[in-house]
Amino acid sequence: MTEPTIFEMSRPNRTGVRFPEPDVPETDLPQEFLREDLPLPEISENEVVRHFTNISQYNHAVDIGFYPLGSCTMKYNPKINEQTARLPGFSLVHPLQPEVTTQGSLGLMYELQQWLAAISGFDAVTLQPAAGAHGELTGVLIIRAYHRSRGEKKRNKMLVPDSAHGTNPATSAMSGMEMVELPSDERGNVDLDALEAECDDTLAGLMITNPNTLGLFDENIEEACRLVHEAGGLVYGDGANLNALLGICRPRENGIDVMHFNLHKTFSTPHGGGGPGSGPVGVIEELAPFLPAPVVDIVKEGDQDTPPLYGLVTPSETIGRVKAFHGHFGMHVRALTYMLSLGGNGLRDVAMTAVLNANYLQALVKDTYHIPYDRLCMHEFVAEGAWDDAPDVRALDVSKRIIDFGFHPPTNYFPLIVPEALMIEPTETETKETLDRFAEVLKQIAEEARENPELLLEAPHDAPFGRLDEVKAAKELILKTELPEDYGDEV
Amino acid sequence: MYTPHTPAEREEMLKTIGVEGIEELFQCLPSTDKFPDLGLPENMTEMEVLSEMAYIASVNETVQELTSFLGAGAYNHYIPAAVDAILQRGEFYTAYTPYQPEIAQGTLQAIFEYQSLIAALTGMDVSNASHYDGATAVAEAVNMAYHRFRERRKRFVISPRLHPHYRATIHTYMEGMDLDIVGEDLDPNCGTEELIKLINDDTALVMVQYPDFFGRIYDFTELGKVAHEHKAMFGVHVNPIALGMLKPPSEFDADIVTGEGQPLGVPLSYGGPYLGLFATKKQYVRKMAGRLAGETVDTRGQRGYVLTLNTREQHIRREQATSNICTNQGLIALASTVYLSLLGKNGLQDLARLNYQKAHYAAEQLNTVPGFHVNMEIPFFNEFVLHCPVPAEEVNEMLLPYDILGGYDLSQDYPGMTHELLVAVTEMNDRAEIDYLVEVLEEESYD
């Protein structure tokens, strides 16, 4: 039984909300500007609430169960974060109000910048980017602007390891850079020889994810950064996997020059079914003048009796704006709430427990699933979801079968350098019982793959929906629905 | 708190892994700066955190406490209670991008309904699953037009009355592309014929705002026609509430419609997260960036939805992708979907008219104050330019002690417009508030 769409539920002249009658004289726009038809659905409030509640039941979510989706850090989203973000003092503030009326927001953003700087070792932070990919774009544009400010226009080559997330190459292309892919070595680190061979005077920089998407700490990170710096390049750090490093080490100390944070991964702001995220960017001192405008700073120091005055300032050589206003402030509130709750020690405990959980789970399943890089992992690990003696079964089938046990599957087919990849990130908020149960399920599925592969090939069996026909969707391209042609005729 | 293990469990887990202590898990890290002291405060209890955050929030003055006539791209509208009730469902907000459609049909159907609503509202064939905000949606429109002509057409005609933040964002996004962006330095009060003069055969996109940054409504039929005569694309950025009454941009033959979705049930929240609307014609669907949900069936014959046309996107195309966008504004798109479902046809029509009428009442009343002037000749929606007898900055400073946010000082973006205040009026401003503004300005007697 599937839920009808809101367009199918519509009946003429129903509505879910009414507005007050005008308390001013009625004036009307000239007819020539008015639209003839507004084909929106008409539904009562009760039906709207039921509809969205009903479809919500088709979702898996962190609040429902284990969600080990690699590289996404699907940790628990504390409820207090939602409460603080909804405080009227935060939610009912207009972004263009005079700064004297928004000292709370500005102070909060300043404090968040300070926390992120302390965690990462960077000297300056912007909170403006809206998501991780947006932070990447910001960071690469900063690198580009830095080289140009020094008259080095030919520095246009961006190195990206083959294990990188797809946004890295797309970002470098979008910024007008030429991308060169670097191979990984046999331990899953960036290949230093290949890197060194590309280090010339056209080098703009290196985009590196550490821990990388194999869940491994890149053992060559310091040497890779040194080589890039020696050649006059800068190192961009993709902070997607920062959860493993909180209080463990600071990316800046490893040699990273500019990095984005994913507040929606590391700092527990909810993923929201695909957004909104938040992707602040931290930089070393030399790059601070290039940050997008505006950033928050103290414009007048405080003293014993008066708090400092915060303001929005434009860095001297700014790359400009990357979006309207000041960033996803609602996410800033949630992230700072989380940081204050945990404190410095709590953040280190997050990283340690995330790494403990991933290694524990890896230890439990590594006899059953091939682990291509058999090392201690960081916050996640990559296993292969295929076996020589189960030739019909692919990683996707393993994933679909996992659904039957009430878990969300791992990330499939990524990173690209591991065939039939299952990328598993348990996060620190899961119990040992959950990890034990998940490992048992993975082992059972491995057994089924050999003995009863149909169980996997036809999975899921216990989900509200079976496998969906993606080919049909792409071929027919039904991207919307609308009210029926004869809608309202009978009234 | 958020990490559950007991010390005994930790020991057991370490034993299973085969290491002595938890520090051993980090043995491959460089020895420099390992386990640094971050110099950060100790943890706090939930009670303490709430108290601290409530204090910080109390330092702000809100549009509830103040009488606000601020708009300029973010508007104070009423949000029905049911919107947030749905957003607070963990099934929605603690899920991620629907990579596994069998257990994500809630998110996918909501995106499909969102796309349907935005298509209906704008009159366009297809909408994507959303961008970060209005500014980035416009930047993506520029990016799309640039790639549509395979990077050969360099001219972009941009209205000076496109939101200044959006124009700035276009420049940042396209910095590496060597574009010829024209139109921004025209007289900010110019008519569409001035934009028409700039269109040539090298033009990739003509981009306007509707109602524009000054709240004004123009008929863009001719502009769209001329753009198409030169085979350029025509883009229109909208305020979705205004489309409750205004002709949809499809009637101007727009190729791309972008919008700031914040007015559709999204709190002001000091500037974000908001919602970037993006819709286009069917023939351009493969050129459009961003996620898309499409209808299909499952193995049991049930109607369902999946993310489709993924081959346009970065995770498949990598450096060949035209945009690096990875996600959409999921939960905010959901907010606007619930909001539009609740209002429906009649609700949105009533709301648009209410905004229109209140703004016109305010403009007419302000026109009676000596020294102040609103041009009533050019139609406007819920926002208008108020000419003041003294610099707008001074008017705002004078109003603040009366707890009034007068509007947006246009000299911040248009250096010649020192005496112009951009005033927004929505359903949240009752007649008494408008009369109060007028009264205070009269008392101040600038003439």
Image: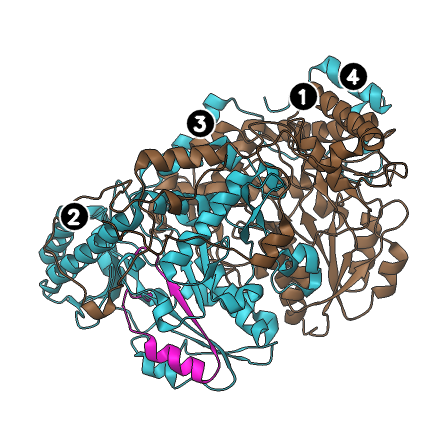
Chain colours: A brown, B cyan
Q: Please indicate, yes or no, whether residue A351 appears anywhere in the rendered image.
A: no
Foreground tag (1 vs 2)? 1
Q: Secondary structure at mark 2?
A: helix
Mark 3 and mark 1, same subunit?
Answer: no
Kindly check if marks 1 and 2 are in contact, taking CB atoms under 8 A apart as contact: no
Amino acid carrying label 3: it is: Leu
What is the distance, in whole Å, between disc 3 and disc 1 at their CAs?
Answer: 26 Å
> What residue did someone put label 3 on?
B50
Kindly check if marks 4 and 1 are in contact, taking CB atoms under 8 A apart as contact: no
Q: Dot 4, crowdedness within 10 Å: few (<14), some or many (≥20)?
A: some
Q: Secondary structure at mark 1?
A: loop
With A334 as the anchor, is B270 left or right in this view? left
The span picked out in magenta is B212-241
Q: Please indicate, yes or no, whether residue B377 appears anywhere in the rendered image.
A: yes
Q: Is residue B300 above or below residue B446?
A: above
Residue B188 or residue A483, whichever sits in front = A483
Chain containing mark 2: B
Whether the magenta-drawn stretch holds residue A7 is answered as no
With A334 as the anchor, is A217 left or right in this view? right
Return the x and y of residue A287 as percentages of the image width and height: 63, 58
Mark 1 and mark 2, same subunit?
Answer: no
What is the distance, in whole Å, between disc 2 and disc 3 at their CAs?
Answer: 33 Å
Q: Is residue A62 above or below residue A311?
A: above
Mark 3 and mark 4, same subunit?
Answer: yes
> What residue did someone put label 2 on?
B433
Residue B378 sits in which quadrant? bottom left
> What residue did someone put label 1 on?
A431
> What residue did someone put label 4 on?
B11
Residue A225 sits in which quadrant? bottom right
